Image (tube, rainbow, N blue to C red):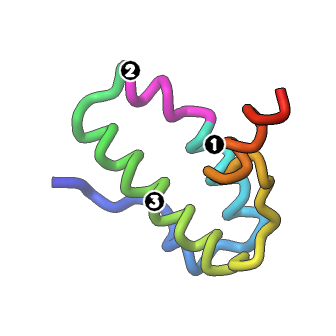
Amino acid sequence: MSMETGIEAAELSEDALRRELRHLHETRNETFLHGSADALEEHTRRTFELEQEYLRRHPEREVNPRRTREGARNVGQHA
């Protein structure tokens, strides 16, 4: 029973999208630990919406090899 809030992700400028994502990532733990069920549901919905828009805009974004399964496995082999 979530009420959608905020500007639709596709309508945000690049700067606004990055700013919104940064804010949501900064507030995630507090919302998870202390927010109501509705607040957590809305936070999750909005984060997903903005992350999907970011991925749509940046399909070829740089991925750190250590952030992949194969790369993470290789780190342990070289330690």
* Residue located 75% across and 43% down the image: 74
Q: Which residue in the protein does label 2 denote? A: 33
Report the quarter where the C terminus lies: top right
Mark 3: which secondary structure?
helix
Q: Is residue 34 above or below residue 27?
A: above
Q: Which residue in the protein does label 1 denote? A: 23
Q: In which image quadrant can residue 10 be found?
A: bottom right
Kind of residue at badge 1: His
| Residue 27 located within the stretch drawn in magenta | yes
Q: Give the mark nearer the N terminus: 2 vs 3.
A: 2
Q: Residue furthest left?
A: 1
Kind of residue at badge 3: Phe
Q: Which residue in the protein does label 3 denote? A: 48
Query: Would you say 33 lies left or right of 1 here?
Result: right
Report the Cα–Cα distance between label 2 and label 1. 16 Å
Q: Residue furthest top?
A: 34
Spot occupied by residue 24 in the image (x, y as percentages of width and height): 56, 44
Q: In which image quadrant can residue 58 be found?
A: bottom right
Extent of the magenta region: 26-33
Q: Give the mark nearer the N terminus: 1 vs 3.
A: 1
